[in-house]
Amino acid sequence: MTFWIPYLHLSNQLEQVQYMMTTAIHVKNPQTQAAILNLFASGGKRLRPAYLLLFSEFTDLEPDKRIALASSIEMLHTATLIHDDVIDQAETRRGVPTISHLYGPEIAVYAGDYLFIAVFRLMIQHALDLSNLSQRVEAMEKLLNGELGQMNLKFNTEQTISDYIDNISGKTAELFAQACAVAPFADGNYRLAQLAYDIGLNIGIAFQIMDDYLDYTADSETLGKPVLADMQQGIYSAPVLFALGADTRVAECLKQEDFDTVFKIIQQTEALQKTYDLARQYTTTALKLINKLPNTPVKSDIRQITEELLERQL
């Protein structure tokens, strides 16, 4: 997790998150157990637990509860990734083979299901009350609705940027929002929790837009996933939608599965610049909201990390 090297205290806490997640997994089926642990070990940015830990600095929560909340948010995220890979028939994740590719979709589905259960068990073990459990249920509902909304618009060349934002607000940004809000919420500071939620939602939207931007500016080896995979599956992200508006050939090229031409048009038009500008717009909103946070040392870390996400290369 080299991203966190400048933040030593946070890096140490994320190591505790990794340990808690690993020790929370007790599956009778050896393949499922190994599959989950290998995915944990494969890394990832750990952004959601990191933001949760950062925002927990505004609270009086005990250290073990902070780590448990951070672990639960990352396990929930991992569960959604496993199920996404089954649906997408993805062969790689984070540069390594997916669980569904290695062990088959059956093991992958069971692994994802198990992690959903592990999330709630972990919260109960650390005496986190029912209101926190209800927050997780609400988050999962919004995640699912975002995925379903995206599914409904597959291969639809008439969808809008507004449609796209609505879907990524659920499927990606909701977990960022929960990550930022859940510690203040658990501490009973509901006003701060709402502000944190709004910050996280904007960070999450910006993050997904940049993720989609990088699909067209980085190769699959850098990203750890096949470039253009979403386009081939009928999932049209911001660069494709902006290209659709810029060149009438794009819709027909998509229909004919001429993805190379679509890729070239994206590069030749302002589609990528408009995508980046959209990500910057949501980042700017997040930064303005961050300015409203209490003036403690962690506030500057939250600001700096949020700015860095806009400039990341992977």
Image (tube, rainbow, N blue to C red):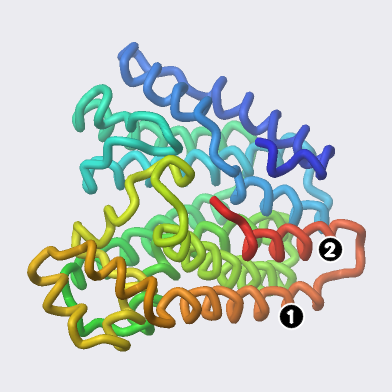
Asked if 109 appears above or below 191 in the picture, the reply is above
Q: Percent from the top left, x then y, of residue 25?
A: 47, 22
- Left/right placement of residue 148 relative to residue 298 reads left
- Quarter where residue 200 is shown: bottom right
- Quarter where residue 55 is shown: bottom right
Name the mark on residue 288: 1
Q: In the rendered structure, are the residues bearing label 2 and label 1 in contact, judged by CB atoms less than 8 Å apart?
A: no
- Quarter where residue 62 is shown: top right
Asked if 167 appears above or below 13 in the picture, the reply is below
Q: Percent from the top left, x then y, of residue 77?
A: 46, 46
Identify the element where label 1 is drawn: helix
> In the rendered structure, which amino acid carries the disc numbered 2?
Lys
Q: Percent from the top left, x then y, of residue 160?
A: 31, 84
CA separation in Å, label 2 and label 1: 12 Å
Name the mark on residue 242: none
**In this view of the protein, which residue sits in the foreground, 192 or 109?**
109
**Residue visible at 20% across and 27% down?**
104
> In the rendered structure, which amino acid carries the disc numbered 1?
Lys
**In this view of the protein, which residue sits in the foreground, 78 or 243?**
243
Name the mark on residue 299: 2
Q: Percent from the top left, x then y, of residue 109?
A: 26, 35
Query: The N terminus lies in which quarter of the figure?
Result: top right
